[in-house]
Image (cartoon, grey):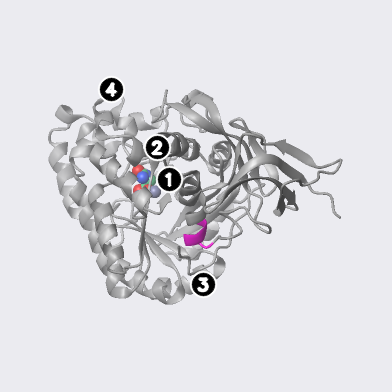
């Protein structure tokens, strides 16, 4: 019998469906055995996990590493961003290749791979963001899916960046991907009303400071755009994925659409579940500006309800890190804040403390939301998203008793502030394993740059 490379001993293995004490044996990057006593050879690395959970690695399907945006570039690049992910128990990330108007989607994909491939420390994939719909784009959809990118993104805002997709483009892309098994993720906000309100509040920007960011993006601007995107999915039969959903109203719209049989799924993020728009009133309120912005406590409550009842199927982070220095570009004008915040490193422990610890979310459900559903919907299951013989050995040994006070200065991210600074967590990853290699221990990265691989994903992802 071959000697195993690694054994995780005596942990409580948690999948979407099960929870049991077992050893997990790893060979050649894959799970080779799950049993009550897996024997380790003289050269086998042993990770003791008694009293700890063993989760499938977290999957964050929404990150923006080294994204050129708002006149700057997000501060966690593919190297540091994937190191931060590993430190927080995430073993797979999906980032975005954003088409440049007038160029092909594949040009954007190849450019993004050239940036990412040499740097990534865990496995990663890309969504293709469509910004230009024409005969060439339409013809390219099949090629992009065949290449291993079955998930597309369309922004219903961001005119100035040249990223915005109008309704005709969204409709056409849903129609095309419906035939080929792809899906369309949307950033859903009502651009025209929103732009008008932004200019209105800009007249009084000294009065409102960063709080104008929230005043100018009322909940109905998300609700309306979500309903509109759902309508196009319903009309075309396309599969729709609402990214970073932030309002209770949008959760209601998704719920109603699902009842009607529309193929719509939704993601929310820890910032929408755990923070509210009072943050914009503080001295450093501008740091929290993200897009869509953080809403009211009743929105958070409805989103939590959605996680429990299945209206919201995935938790991701929309990581788009900007340091205090980068955020200072706002200089009192809320229109100039680079939108985005760090998150991939704290997603799993925050969701454990706040979801499992405080709200009674089952550990299986935590795994479902942060690993299994992302793997299934995004065409990576069962290689990713579960612990089973033959799956990739992406594992997180999670200590449910470990107490950590979050401090930006202790985290791997290049961000010098944290939206959750000083939050007291109970439960934290102690060891993260990516395809059989230990890549992080006690919140510190110990892996290798370039260990990560580009993931070729499959179409027809569903739950
Ligand atoms: O504020 C955010 N979310 N920045 C990144 C771009 C986006 O909209 O996802
Ligand atoms: Zn967005
Ligand atoms: Zn985003």
Label 2 close to label 3 by CB (< 8 Å)? no
Relative to 461, say whether 355 is above or below: above
Label 2 close to label 1 by CB (< 8 Å)? no
Crowd tier of the residue under label 4, counting other residues whose Cα lies within 10 Å: few below 14, some 14–19, many 20 or above: few
Placement of the C terminus among the 4 image quadrants: bottom left
Magenta segment range? 375-379
Q: Is residue 224 left or right of residue 138?
A: left
- Pinpoint residue 17: horizontal percent, then vertical percent: 53, 54
Relative to 434, say whether 140 is above or below: below
Q: Residue at x 85, y 53 (%)?
A: 2
Label 3 close to label 4 by CB (< 8 Å)? no
Q: Earlier in the sequence, mark 4 or mark 2?
A: 4
Residue 400 got which mark? none
Disc 4, ligand 1: is the CB inside 8 Å? no
Using the numbered discs, state the Cα–Cα distance from disc 2 to disc 1 in whole angstroms: 14 Å
Disc 2, ligand 1: is the CB inside 8 Å? yes
Q: Nearer the viewer, residue 421 or 351?
A: 351
Q: Was residue 376 drawn as part of the magenta stretch in this picture?
A: yes
Residue 68 got which mark? 1
Q: Earlier in the sequence, mark 2 or mark 1?
A: 1
Using the numbered discs, state the Cα–Cα distance from disc 1 to disc 4 in whole angstroms: 27 Å
Point out the frontmost of discs 2 and 1.
Answer: 2
Using the numbered discs, state the Cα–Cα distance from disc 3 to disc 4 in whole angstroms: 49 Å
Crowd tier of the residue under label 3, counting other residues whose Cα lies within 10 Å: few below 14, some 14–19, many 20 or above: some
From the image, tell me which residue sits under label 3: 143
Judging from the image, what secondary structure is the residue with disc 2 in?
Answer: loop
Using the numbered discs, state the Cα–Cα distance from disc 2 to disc 3 in whole angstroms: 33 Å
Point out the frontmost of discs 2 and 3.
Answer: 2
């Amino acid at each position: 019998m071959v000697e195993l490379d690694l054994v995780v001993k005596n942990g409580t293995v948690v999948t979407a469906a099960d929870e049991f004490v077992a050893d997990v044996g790893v060979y050649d990057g894959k799970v080779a055995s799950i049993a009550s006593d897996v024997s380790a050879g003289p050269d086998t690395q042993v990770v003791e996990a008694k009293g700890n959970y063993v989760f499938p690695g977290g999957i964050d399907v929404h990150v923006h590493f080294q994204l050129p945006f708002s006149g700057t570039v997000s501060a966690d690049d593919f190297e540091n961003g994937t190191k931060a992910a590993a430190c927080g128990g995430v073993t797979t990330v999906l980032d975005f290749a954003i088409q440049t108007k007038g160029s092909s989607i594949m040009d954007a994909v190849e450019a993004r791979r050239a940036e990412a491939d040499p740097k990534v420390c865990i496995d990663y994939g890309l969504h293709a963001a469509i910004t230009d719909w024409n005969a060439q784009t339409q013809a390219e959809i099949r090629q992009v899916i065949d290449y291993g990118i079955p998930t597309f993104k369309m922004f219903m805002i961001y005119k100035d960046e040249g990223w915005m997709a109008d309704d005709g483009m969204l409709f056409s892309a849903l129609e095309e991907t419906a035939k080929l098994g792809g899906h369309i993720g949307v950033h859903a906000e009502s651009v025209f009303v929103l732009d008008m309100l932004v200019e209105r509040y800009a007249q009084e920007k000294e009065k409102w400071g960063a709080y104008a960011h929230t005043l100018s993006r009322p909940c109905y601007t998300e609700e309306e755009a979500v309903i509109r995107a759902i309508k196009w999915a319903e009309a075309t039969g396309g599969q729709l994925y609402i990214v970073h959903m932030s309002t209770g109203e949008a959760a209601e719209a998704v719920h109603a659409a699902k009842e009607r049989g529309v193929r719509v799924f939704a993601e929310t993020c820890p910032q929408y579940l755990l923070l509210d728009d009072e943050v914009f009133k503080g001295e450093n309120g501008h740091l929290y500006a993200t897009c869509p912005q953080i809403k009211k406590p009743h929105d958070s409550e409805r989103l939590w309800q959605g996680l429990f009842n299945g209206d919201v199927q995935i938790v991701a982070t929309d990581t788009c890190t900007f340091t205090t220095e980068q955020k200072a570009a706002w200089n009192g004008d809320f229109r100039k804040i680079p939108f985005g915040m760090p998150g991939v490193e704290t997603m799993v422990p925050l969701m454990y403390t706040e979801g499992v610890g405080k709200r009674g979310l089952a550990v299986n459900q935590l795994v479902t939301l942060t690993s299994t559903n992302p793997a299934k919907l995004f065409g990576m299951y069962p290689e990713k998203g579960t612990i089973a013989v033959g799956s990739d050995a992406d594992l997180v040994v999670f200590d449910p008793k470990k107490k950590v006070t979050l401090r930006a200065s202790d985290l791997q991210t290049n961000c010098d502030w944290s939206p959750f600074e000083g939050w007291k967590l109970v439960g934290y990853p102690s060891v993260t394993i990516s395809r059989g290699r230990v890549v992080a221990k006690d919140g510190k990265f110990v892996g290798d740059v370039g260990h990560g691989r580009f993931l070729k994903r499959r179409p027809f992802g569903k739950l």
